Image (cartoon, rainbow, N blue to C red):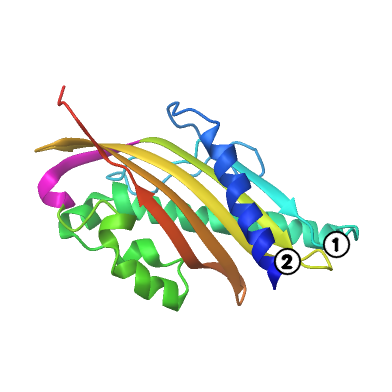
Amino acid sequence: MPLIVGLVLLLVIAAVVVLLTRDDAPPKSTRADGATKTSDVVSPTVPSFRFTDSSRELVRTSPQRIGRRHRQASVAAASAAQQVLTDLYAEGFLDPANREAGRYADAFGGFARGARDRAVTRVGLLTAGARAGDRFERIEPRSARLATRILLDREGAPVLLVSTVRFSALASGSETVLLRSTGQYFFERAGSTWKIVSFQVVRNDTPREPK
């Protein structure tokens, strides 16, 4: 158990360091494997949202060679985590229907049950907020970066993912605010997919003078 705890801490620290060394350039799309991502949010009313940078790193717990099957499973796991987080930030900040209603149930579809129960009580932390429809007419993404570290078991199979996200968006309306969110999301396998089982998010929103 101490070994696992230590590895988890290393996963978080390393992912945070990777993201903190990058600037806030305008977003461009990349996939978890480094290739260009072509899919955007489908609804024309939702601003296009893609992760600017997306990286992954395998963390071994044994010197055993990682076979092709486990390596492919790790790539699939990282891709699944990226999709969950894409949905979370798109639904939680950029979808005007959710914002105007002040309800974000669609944002939490990738959370395991316990984590989802916790998430719905922290709407102001994980989304634009219950009053966002009154405050903002538009929210446009500025930057979104993702670093995922994948903990492997002794056989080389992925058992835990830690994804660190840095996200910012400019919200304008009755007030103008640069929304900033930095979060760590822990994923475990749930059946054939991966779900968020725990999270730690910090918001650092900054008021801006309207142009």
Instruction: State the mark number for residue 19.
Output: none
Asked if residue 30 can be seen in this view, the reply is no
Residue placed most toward the observer, 39 or 157:
157
Q: How many C-alpha atoms fall within 10 Å of the one at disc 1: few (<14), some, or many (≥20)?
A: few
Image coordinates for residue 79, horizontal then vertical, percent: 60, 54
Amino acid on which the number 1 mark rests in the picture = Ser
> For mark 1, what is the residue?
62
Image coordinates for residue 162, horizontal then vertical, percent: 58, 57
Image coordinates for residue 180, horizontal then vertical, percent: 34, 41
Asked if residue 83 can be seen in this view, the reply is yes
> For mark 2, what is the residue?
3
Residue placed most toward the observer, 204 or 75:
204
* 125 horizontally vs 150: left or right: left
Q: Which residues are magenta?
A: 132-141
At 62% from the left edge and 73% from the top edge, which residue is drawn?
Answer: 192
Q: Is residue 176 above or below residue 190?
A: above
At 34% from the left edge and 56% from the top edge, which residue is drawn?
Answer: 126
Location of the C terminus by quadrant is top left
Location of the N terminus by quadrant is bottom right
At 46% from the left edge and 66% from the top edge, which residue is drawn?
Answer: 110
Q: What secondary structure characterizes most of the magenta part? A: strand
- Say if the magenta span includes residue 135: yes
